Image: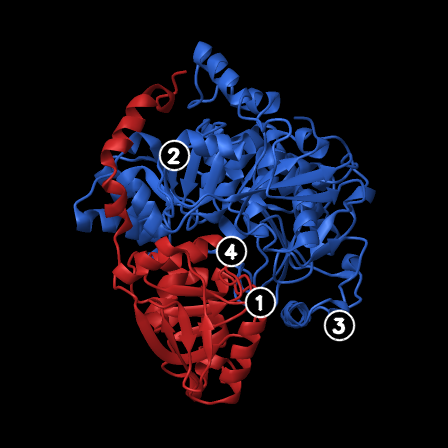
Chain colours: A red, B blue
Amino acid sequence: MQPFIKSTGLVAPVDRVNVDTDAIIPKQFLKRIERSGFGQFLFFEWRFDEQGNTIPSFNLNKPRYQGASILLSRANFGCGSSREHAPWAILDYGFNVIIAPSYADIFYNNCFKNGILPIKLTEEQVDDLFKRTESSEGYKLTVDLENKVITDDQGLNIPFELDEHRRQFLLQGLDDIGLTLQHADEIAAYEAKNEKRLANVF
Amino acid sequence: MFEKIWNNHVIHSEEGKPSILYIDLHLVHEVTSPQAFEGLRMTGRKVRRPDLTFATMDHNVPTKDRFNISDPISKQQIDTLTANATEFGVKLYDLNTIDQGVVHVMGPELGLTHPGKTIVCGDSHTSTHGAFGALAFGIGTSEVEHVLATQCLQQSKAKTMKVNFIGKRPAGITAKDLILGLIAKYGTDFATGYVIEYTGEAITGLTMEERMTVCNMSIEGGARAGLIAPDETTFNYLRGREYAPQGEDFDRAVEQWKALATDEGAVYDAEVDLDVASLVPQVTWGTSPGMGTGITSIVPYPDQLPTENERKAAEKALEYMDLAPGTPMSEIPIDYVFIGSCTNGRIEDLRAAASVAKGYTVSPNVTAIVVPGSGRVKIQAEKEGLDKIFTAAGFEWREAGCSMCLAMNPDVLQPGQRCASTSNRNFEGRQGRGGRTHLVSPEMAAAAAIKGKFTDVRNWEFKSEVTA
């Protein structure tokens, strides 16, 4: 996985609460057996109408938000299904940072497995970022994971919190299966101790 | 209870890091596993415990002419699971077996789900298995690969929440109404970061299948998992099942399982209450499972909601659902009925729906399908003649699978169609682009099919008892 250290990018707002993973990537696109190529289907039913035409009023279709790498949204982002196709689509589309007041658990966890940084800010801070993004075309933020701070070029400076283990995980781009396998002896010992139970013998 | 199961499975813990948790049972289906098996191949890793890993195909499976999958990508996904199961030595219940079905119906039926186990699956509704007092939760594909390779997961410990269902469950109120009522009251993220334990006489009085309905939708409240303490109901359900401990092992297991219950006086990180006695049958009106109300109520006025974000969300939802504020819930006409899913596709659900449908005819404007949760449910229902009751009333009787719960197979709503559904999510487009989903119990769905609109099943005139 690519390490995430610092990133500057255009902010695209999706102003809805409870953005669910069915909206992020509808089920008809979950049938592929690869990890790649899901970006074209991101927010598919909000981006395209039934005939496949672009819906101009949806933010991601507006010229001013093209090339955005920071997705700004509302509370309980990523609720619903556990499909990792949702973060795959977000990353493949070009986002590597999400900012919202809260996230659904499984989605939040899935982000870190894919090098996406989901940042939690307060409702007020998120509101303020919506205003800044909407009022100034080309609005960019810099997200510095080493110092846990978000800045813009107008002097904004928002520190954010992140679990230290998760931070290191992203900073170093770690392979967590490899990390767990470092404890192979302990796994084997647990299995030996619980052998009967795991074989349905009590 | 959560604490006990957690402590029984921690292999390694270090300050400031997630713990390494052993997983006793890993269920696998075709949608969230292909990339995980591919990851194993790329890194030269094997499945550590094929004996603790069980697979089935459910999401893509057609419910008519199931061996003839017309969508080539669906077919490829199903064939990929078959190939992966063979290559990695994982037991697969495929379309040729009677055990095939929705993964969360199949696991308990086979007796794979035990109290005290840690259970995961690449599917958010894994919370279903918490009904047995198992710690069961959904994971993403990277974690599916992690469990396949290591039989472990890195997990931070969740907080605990006690949900008190207060009072007796009134007649005509189902398990589905309990959980929909809870989410309608507290919202879709009240339990984010928590493992819920459901308690109260309304819970202990539920059958095993009803408990599964409640735990199934824990995720719709944001919870990592939902738990119900195992008791005689649990043990009686499990006794004699294929993968349950057998003979004296079962009796010894029961003694261990009894010790899992939360100790008297244990403290939870949070507690919430729901008054059961005042519940009425629930129907959702919006595009989030928390947007629900009673059948005797009306579609809400967004401007009366407390926060700006809620008002905006409700306005968007009502626009999508094409509903006017103030409309009585009992005057909303429907086009489609779906009875099935991991929430309500078990034999008791089908019996309940059939008891409503018996002797009636589906409204001419409605298409109604019944999709058993598994091959075994289907066979049992046919043995009891439920299929005859449904087909005589004009319902379509289908083959087992996830079907219209998420419409990955050919069962899809057309734009603008309105569906009374016994599934778990009413998100925009969930059952098909432009489709409008109202979540209800099997009884309410069957009654809606017959009336052509939602109706209070508590006033239903049952034509005669369905004998089991």
Kind of residue at disc 4: Gly
Q: What element carries label 1?
A: loop
Pick whichever, B27 or B439, lies toward us.
B27
Q: Which residue shows up at 38% across the image and 34% down it?
A: B10
Spot occupied by residue A47 in the image (x, y as percentages of width and height): 47, 76
* Label 3, residues with CA under 10 Å away: few <14, some 14-19, many ≥20: some
Labels 1 and 4 within one chain: yes
Spot occupied by residue B277 in the image (x, y as percentages of width and height): 80, 40
Do the numbered discs 2 and 4 sit on residues whose CB atoms are within 8 Å?
no
Q: In this view, does B61 lie above or below B389?
A: below
Q: Is mark 3 on a helix, strand or loop?
A: helix
The N terminus of chain B, quarter of image: top right
Select label 1 or label 4 by which is in front: 1
Kind of residue at disc 2: Val
Q: In which quarter of the image is residue B166?
A: top right
Kind of residue at disc 3: Asp
Labels 1 and 2 within one chain: no
Compute the Cα span from label 3 to label 4: 26 Å
Q: Which residue shows up at 79% across the image and 48% down it?
A: B456
* Label 1, residues with CA under 10 Å away: few <14, some 14-19, many ≥20: many
Spot occupied by residue B20 in the image (x, y as percentages of width and height): 35, 40
